[in-house]
Image (cartoon, grey):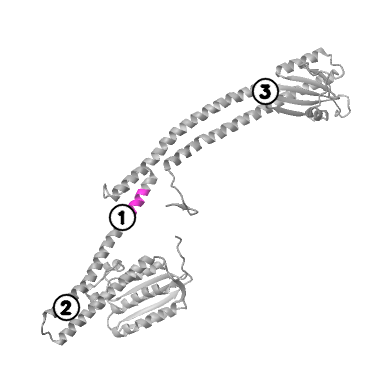
Amino acid sequence: MNKRNGKERKPKSIKLFVFIAIIAVGVIPGMLIMGGAMRLYEDRSLQSEVSSVLAEAKLLVNQIESVGYLNDPTNDALTTNLSSVGNAYFGRIMVLDSSLRVIRDTYGVDEGRIVVWNNAVTALSGETVNTYDRGHSVIIVTVPIRSAYSEDQKEVDGVLIITKSTDSISRNIKFYREIFILVTLVLLFASVGLSFYLSSAVKKPVEKMKKSILDIKNGLGSGTLEVNDFSETSEISESFNGVLEQMRSIDDSRQEFVSNVSHELKTPLTSMKVLADSINSMEDAPIDMYKEFMADIGNEIDRETKIINDLLSLVKLDKSGNALNITQVNMNELMELLLKRLSPIAEKQKVDLVMESFRPVTAEVDEVKFSLAIMNLVENGIKYNVEGGYVHVSLNADHQYFFVRVEDSGMGIPEDSISHIFDRFYRVDKSHSREIGGTGLGLAITKNCVVMHHGEIKVRSTEGEGTTFDVRVPLRYIEEEK
């Protein structure tokens, strides 16, 4: 269940997501591109129209100045030319003198009137102004008429105002807008169709995977996930099958573990039952036999207790996972303390127990769990040794790891058994293990403890010569992100 800010987040539909994504990718960019193209067309068209009007205005200004039209607006040829240009532009031309009085209006409406308009005032100061009136669809160009007789030709005698219709631009924009709407609708329908097709195509293998997983859950079909419609679904299938195989292996191991636990717990109980029945069947059994049988029953009880304690240790390790009580530990002192605890067992077995430290080592470990791992290794080295043999324990470190080596001169491990010694309940020599109280769980516990510290353990052994365990653990414990 996905949550964000303490609230449940509903899962998204792949089909809906693909549908929306294709609509967005197919339609929105097209609308933006075509809208931008129309805007660009309008701007470029207006610039072209303004340039054309300005060129025509310069010609008219030159003619007005050359014939002295501002002083004598009776020049029929120029008047006709002004009217012709105005008609060609579907617009209007006005000539104003220096007092902004209209001396010629091609519409014949405002002649003789004073025009107080910002653009006209600005043009009278010598600046050319152009304006686009989008509401009336016209371009208005206002040009100063400069005196040809002034020394620097900066003196302004009047103003020329040309109004040109932009209906043709508006009609073209309207035409292109209709095309734009048509294309947008085509894109929309095409995107909808494509999105339906692709979303269904994407959802189909997902539905197939869902059905296959349900079949596997219900014990139907081939028992594996085979959806190879896309490379991604094929990779997911491979990963799922790998996890499924691992789970099956874990399930098989669990069943085998339960079977081994049942057998190991049942064996001492069976022995105690046989011993008890034997005693009960003897009416006049001598006291020595009673003592012998009771001693045997006590040994079986100790063996049962050992198995149960090891099982509890494994269960605690499995349940706690990465929940370690990490502290700074002086490894030299810890190793000396562990060997001191095991020295009575070594003396009893007549095994020489030697400790060697190459340098002071301080590491971040769970003292209890790591002690359990080393105790198991050293105790095994003592128990599975020969009389007069040795167990050599060494401690060393570099800038990143510390190393513990436990080397013994015992019976060794056959080559075909080395890869299995860390399996639960695996014992190389079952008869000898039972004689010395082995449960087959010690090395499994050891490896679990080492791995929990992000370390590793390796073993080298020669049958009949001895065994060496090498443990490597980081000096600084780094907690994994969850």
In the figure, is residue 462 to the left or right of 454? left
| Residue identified by numbered label 2 | 276
Q: Mark 2 Cα within 10 Å, few/some/many (few <14, many 20+)?
A: some
For residue 48, the mark is none
What secondary structure do most residues of the magenta stretch adopt? helix
For this rendering, which residue is in front, 50 or 211? 211
Residue stretch rendered in magenta on the structure: 236-246
Q: Position of residue 445 (x, y in %)?
A: 34, 70
| Residue identified by numbered label 1 | 245
Regarding residue 90, the answer to whether it shows in the image is: yes
For this rendering, which residue is in front, 13 or 205? 13
Regarding residue 227, the answer to whether it shows in the image is: no
Identified at 78% across, 17% down, the residue is 109
Count of numbered circles in the view: 3
Q: Position of residue 271 (x, y in %)?
A: 18, 75
Helix, strand or loop at mark 3: loop
364 lies above or below 178: below
107 lies above or below 470: above
For residue 166, the mark is 3
220 lies above or below 50: below
Helix, strand or loop at mark 2: helix
Identity, as a three-letter code, of the amino acid under mark 1: Glu
Tell me which label, 3 or 2, sits earlier in the chain: 3
108 lies above or below 416: above
In the figure, is residue 285 to the left or right of 25? left
